[in-house]
Structures are given as C-alpha cells and as structure tokens.
Amino acid sequence: MRIGMFALAAGAPLDDVVAQARLARDAGLDSVFFGHVPSWDALMVAALAGREAPGLEVGTAVLPTWPRHPLALASQALTAQATTGGRFTLGIGPSHPPVIEGAHGIPYERPARHVREYLSALRPLLRGEDVEYRGETLTAVGTVDAPGATPPPVIISALGPAMLRVAGELADGTVTTWTGAGAIGDHIVPSITRAAEAAGRPAPRVLAGVVVALTTDPDGVRRELAEQFAAASDFPGYRAILDRQGLSGVHETVVAGDEAAVERELRRFADAGATDLLISPRGDVPRVLEVAASLRSAPVTATRGAPA
C-alpha cells in the first residue's frame, strides 16, 4: 500500500504550502496531493511541489470540474505533467452544490452525467487528440498541443454508485474522503472494480483519504473536527456515504489515538483493498507521517468485498 499526504493548497504563504512536498518526501512517503479551496491554485501548487521534491508523486485531490473547461484543464494538466517529469496525477470532481451554485452561479445538475461527459472530452485531449465533443452539459472542440508531455493519470472523487461506475469505466481510480475502511472494503473497492472489469480496463487505484491524529484525547480531536467541518456533514455526497456507514458526521471517520491504535486502524485500509492512503495529519505532523510511512509495505491479510 502506497502512503501519501493530503494537504490543502491554502492557509500559508505559497512557499510554505509547496514545502509540504519536501516534508512528505523526507518522511519517506510516496506522494502528496493538494486539495483545492479558494486560495492558491492546487494544480499549480502541485506542479511547483514536483520540482521541489524530485521522485515524489504529486497531484490534486480534487479540482472542481464545473468552473474549468476541459480544454483549459487539459492544457494546465499537461503543463504540470511536463513540469514534474511525468509525476503528476490529476484528481477532479464535481464538488458540491453550495460551492458550484452558491459561489460560481453554475447549475449543479446530475453530477455523474456531467463528470462522464467531462472525462469523455478530457481524456482524448490529454492524449493530444483532436476532439469534437458535444454533450448535454458541455461542448469541447479542439486539441491541446503539448510536445513531449505524456497524459497524466486521472482520478475522480467518487463515493456513490453512479460516480463509482464512471470512475471504473473512464478514470484511473477514485479518491475518497470521510470514508472508513469498512466502506472502502464493502462498497468502494468492489463497485469501482466491477465497473473497470466490465469496461475491460485495468484494476483502478483507490486512494483513501483519512484524517489521522496521534493523541491521548481522541474524543477531543473528534469534537474539534466536528466543529471545524460541521457543514461538510450536510453536503449531499458526504451525507450519503456517512449514512451508508451509520455515522452522524465526518468527525467519526477520524483515526485518532496512540501509535498502536493508529497503526491498527490504518492497516485496515490495506486489508480493505485501498491501493493508497492519503494522510491528513493533525497535531504532531512529523510523527504522524513517520508512523504512516512505516506502513508502506503493510501486509494485506484480507480484502473485504473483493469481486469473485
């Protein structure tokens, strides 16, 4: 199981945000993925981070699709891929109604259909092909000429059945959030794997995002997260995956405790079939990353929900 770090491209001067890639590399991790919020551009941060930390996979988790046309994003992604020497992974997703409708004024309708159409236009553009795509939600006509750049892998944020089908059929994997090991093994892995197999595609990556804290007060950490991310628990996509897990809020997905407890819980993700963990560290960040890095070769004892 590969271990990476999830970092927001926000909250600090640009140099400090980019420096998180060196922190991940020095801790012995495999990757760093940047989340996008209204601050520094996550894709550009990832490209810069790739230069700062040679050998490290860098990526976005995730960029909202609605505000960026596939032609524009293909150009940006190929630039990032060339900048990093082929170590960039593009993570995209439809985001949430409060962001897309509330902030951008764009109707948020049938997100799975939108992402399917977006990928149908984007993937050929990343391969340098001429595209003339006219769908219900977007039109893309043209090509992107980026000599020497290879198409980056594309992952999407997928939690529900419809989005997991899209991920398996058209993307290289999924990146999850607020999803425990049980739901990874029982729902995410089997759903996306079935879709990929039916489409004749390779086994997909499953990058499981998880908040991790080394602490003597795990309940206190969860209370803090409950306050910080209270609104997220009501976003429709998150609410559905939380309900599937029987959880009241996103804070209940946090892995928190002493080192033994954290290691035990993180190994469950490998057993569930996750190919990657993206650790969002809390508290003593270097120590959390050190503990996480020790699991890079964690043995897989079972894979729950694997297709027969």
Image (spheres, rainbow, N blue to C red):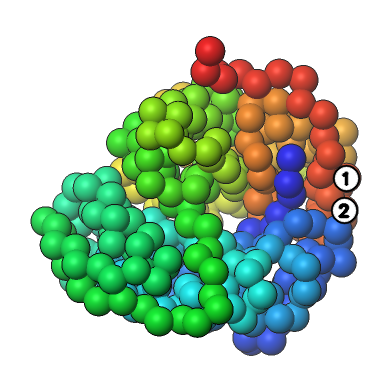
Among the 4 quarters of the image, the one containing residue 223? top right
Residue 12 visible in the current orientation: no
Q: Give amino acid for label 2.
A: Glu
* Residue 285, x across and y down, in percent: 79, 60
Vertical order, 230 against 268 (above or below): below
Determine the CA span between mark 1 and mark 2. 6 Å
Disc 2: which residue: 290
Q: Secondary structure at mark 2?
A: helix
Vertical order, 191 against 55 (above or below): above
| Residue under the point 24% across and 54% down | 117
Q: With 104 as the anchor, is 81 left or right in this view?
A: right
Query: Few, some or many C-alpha atoms within 10 Å of disc 1 (few <14, some 14-19, many ≥20)?
Result: some
Q: Give amino acid for label 1.
A: Ser
Query: Few, some or many C-alpha atoms within 10 Å of disc 2 (few <14, some 14-19, many ≥20)?
Result: some
| Residue under the point 41% across and 43% down | 167
Disc 1: which residue: 294
- Of residue 96 and residue 269, the one placed in the foreground of this image is 269
Vertical order, 116 against 41 (above or below): above
